[in-house]
Image (cartoon, rainbow, N blue to C red):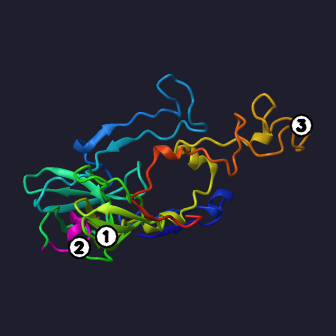
Amino acid sequence: MGLKKFRPTTNALRHTVLSDFAEITKSRPEKSLLTPLHSSGGRNSYGRITMRFRGGGHKRMYRLVDFKRDRIDAVAKVLAIEYDPNRSSRIALIEYPDKVRSYIIAPLELKVGDTVISTFDPDAEIKPGNCMPIANIPLGTAIHNIELQPGQGGQIVRSAGTAAQIMAKEGSEAHIRLPSSEVRKIRTTCRATIGQIGNVEHESISIGKAGRSRWLGRRGKVRGVAMNPVDHPHGGGEGKAPQGNPHPVTPWGKPTKGYKTRQKRKYSDKDIVRRRKKGN
């Protein structure tokens, strides 16, 4: 697991830094765990663009990742570590004793041949890949794929290189420090997986060229000042001279800096012990 730099034979390669994919042990996905994934191109059910600058990109199949880990006390063996085009983390192919196969998010230290288990046993081994209730996990342990409601399946801390930490337990609630530095209360009956997620070098990747963004389905963003007045409040003018409203606004005229759009009455902060730091 590492990074690959290139000889600067072109302008794009001069700045390109990609993963070397050294941890990948299987190149073709498990056919039984694939399902078609249709691209929306940023359009809603009416065919209208609701997210600009999306479209194209390479075709993908969705890998059915098991976030619930609901096969309790069944020891599974890790068969392979695979690439998943739909997420930044790697996925591990595991097989249960009855030959049923499944995908899970691959923790940092998980290797082919290791065994993992999902259990409620308080005496279970604390090792990467094992899934258990937060009540059974020691303080300070790195965890990921954390449930917000018991039995709902892991919903947070699922991207490459991330891990949360159990800071304290008070009765039926635990204080979990998330990767954003936010400390949040989560019920101890919720389950989580032990370990930090692998592919930690993902944050150091530099795609190098605009074309690779297009492969990922991201089209180029056009600046408002480069548009015509009919297309954007910042558009028009002679040369690079700004035209119209001097304050930064969206194409629909709403302020873009410091303007609060969140309706507080729809959200609850009762589970947040400490807010994340600014800049995270």
Q: CA distance from mark 2 to mark 3?
A: 62 Å
The residue drawn where x is 57% and y is 56% is 207
In-image side of 5 versus 141 (left or right): right
State yes or no: discs 1 and 2 in contact (Cβ < 8 Å).
yes
Q: Residues within 10 Å of mark 1 (few under 14, many from 20)?
A: many
Q: Which residue is mark 3?
A: 237
Q: On residue 226, which mark appears?
A: none
Displayed quadrant of residue 241 = top right
Which residue occupies 8% across, 57% down? 97
- Please provide percent x and percent y for residue 98: 7, 52
The range drawn in magenta is 123-137
Q: What residue is disc 2 on?
A: 127
Element class at badge 1: loop
Disc 3 and disc 1: Cα gap in Å? 55 Å
Callout 1, which amino acid?
Gly
Q: SS of the residue at dot 3? A: loop
- 240 to the left or right of 175: right
Which residue lies under the disc numbered 1?
A: 195
Mark 3 or mark 1: name the one nearer the start of the chain.
1
**Three-letter residue code for mark 3:** Gly
Whole-Å distance between the Cαs marked 1 and 2? Answer: 7 Å
270 lies above or below 62: below
Q: Residue at (36%, 41%) from the top-left corner?
A: 61
Q: Does residue 200 lie above or below 266 as drawn?
A: below
Residue 191 horizontal side relative to residue 71, left or right: right
